[in-house]
Image (cartoon, grey):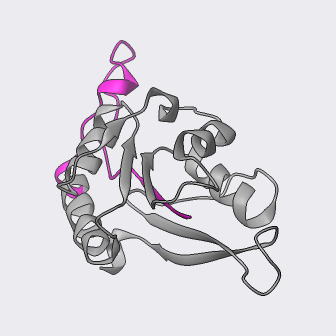
Amino acid sequence: MDLILWRHADAAALTNESEADFHRKLTGKGRKQAAAIAIWLERHLPDSARVLASPAIRAQQTAEALGRKFATVHELGVGAPAAQVLIAAGWPDNRHPVVVVGHQPTLGRVASLLLFGTEQDLSMRKGAVWWITNRARKDVGDADSRLTLRAAICPDYL
């Protein structure tokens, strides 16, 4: 399975305490970040990839930049536990690649859990993508698998 973790792009700061974090929108910089990553993803994602996004406006706008249909998954919202993200994505058994558009620190924790076996706060830049692949090893059977970080890229490098 391919799991692509995409942190939402740069969003407006909260302007007052009564404003809901949920409603924060992408800034101009954030729209450019999302567009750059979307172009890169479109070149690399197969047509069968599923896109799942947090219901927060900034995550929705980031996902929209890809120009594909996506599902809004409430379990991917701000503060979601890493294990919940993996369940929503169908890890590790989903037959299709899954793009998860979400938030920090959740996505960093998901990556840490998969790559190191423990949940730590890995820092993931705004708009960045981390592509993790899990493949069954043919030489030892389906019981063993190989986890690979295929790509880790932020919009500044595109």
Specify start and end residues of the magenta stretch as a single range.
Answer: 1-29
In the image: residue 4, left or right of residue 42? right
Residue 25 belongs to magenta span: yes
- Could one spot residue 81 in this view of the protein? yes
How many badges with numbers are in the image? 0
Q: What kind of secondary structure does the magenta stretch mostly adopt?
A: loop
Q: In which quarter of the image is residue 132?
A: bottom right
> Going by the picture, which residue comes out furthest to the top?
18
Q: Which of 85 and 126 is in front in this view?
A: 85
Q: Residue 47: percent from the left, percent from the top?
A: 28, 65
Where is 138 relative to 53, above or below? below
Residue located 81% across and 72% down the image: 144
Residue 99 pos. (x, y %): 42, 55
In this view, the residue in front, 60 or 32, is 60
Q: Where is residue 57 in the image (x, y as percent from the top left)?
A: 28, 33
- 21, 35: nearer the viewer: 35
Judged from this view, the residue extending furthest toward the bottom is 139
3 sits left or right of 141 in the view: left
Q: Where is residue 112 in the image (x, y as percent from the top left)?
A: 71, 59
Where, quadrant-wise, is the C terminus in this rendering?
A: bottom left
**Visible residue check, residue 105:** no
In the image, taking residue 95 as reference, residue 44 lies left or right, namely: left
Tell me the residue at 35%/31% (across/down): 56
Considering depth in this image, is 5 or 18 the residue closer to the camera? 5
The residue under the point 55% across, 54% down is 94
Tell me: residue 27, above or below residue 158: above
- Give the quadrant of the N terminus: bottom right
**Could you tell whether 128 is left or right of 107 in the image?**
left
Q: Residue at x 39, y 44 (%)?
A: 52
* Magenta span includes 101: no
